[in-house]
Image: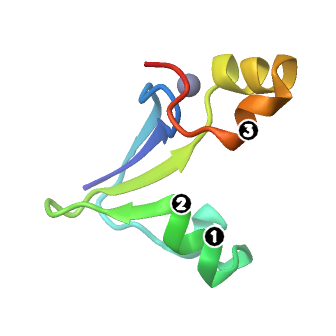
Amino acid sequence: MAVVYQCNHCGNVIGQLDQQVIDTSTLGFNELSNQDRKEMIEYQVNGDIKIKTICEDCQESLENNPHYHELDNFIQ
Ligand SMILES: [Zn+2]
């Protein structure tokens, strides 16, 4: 069982957390709105949890090119 942080834009895996038991409250999920939770967190069939986030590269690209905020998957 793992928590995988993956960039929502380029698909890079940023980090992975392997745990026997995942206590979602330690991940700060309870600070997110239900809407955010639905958009950011994906439960995989194998029990893993995928967190959609943004990597440093994409963050930088977004800051340099603010209009890309409109586009999903702008890096192919
Ligand atoms: Zn990225």
Residue identifier under label 3: 69
Question: Left or right: 8 with respect to 42?
Answer: right
Q: Where residue 65 appears, x then y in whole percent?
A: 81, 21
Give the SS element for disc 1: helix
Residue depicted at x 61% and y 28%: 55
Residue depicted at x 38% and y 62%: 42
Which quarter of the rendered picture does the C terminus lie within?
A: top left
Q: Tag 1: residue type?
A: Asp
- Disc 3 to disc 1: CB gap under 8 Å: no
Q: Tag 2: residue type?
A: Met
Residue identifier under label 1: 36
Q: Where residue 67 appears, x then y in whole percent?
A: 80, 31
Which quarter of the rendered picture does the N terminus lie within?
A: bottom left
Between 63 and 41, the one lying in front of the other is: 63
Residue 40, numbered label: 2
Question: Left or right: 64 with respect to 45?
Answer: right
- Disc 2 to disc 1: CB gap under 8 Å: yes
Within the displayed image, which quadrant is ligand 1 positioned in? Answer: top right
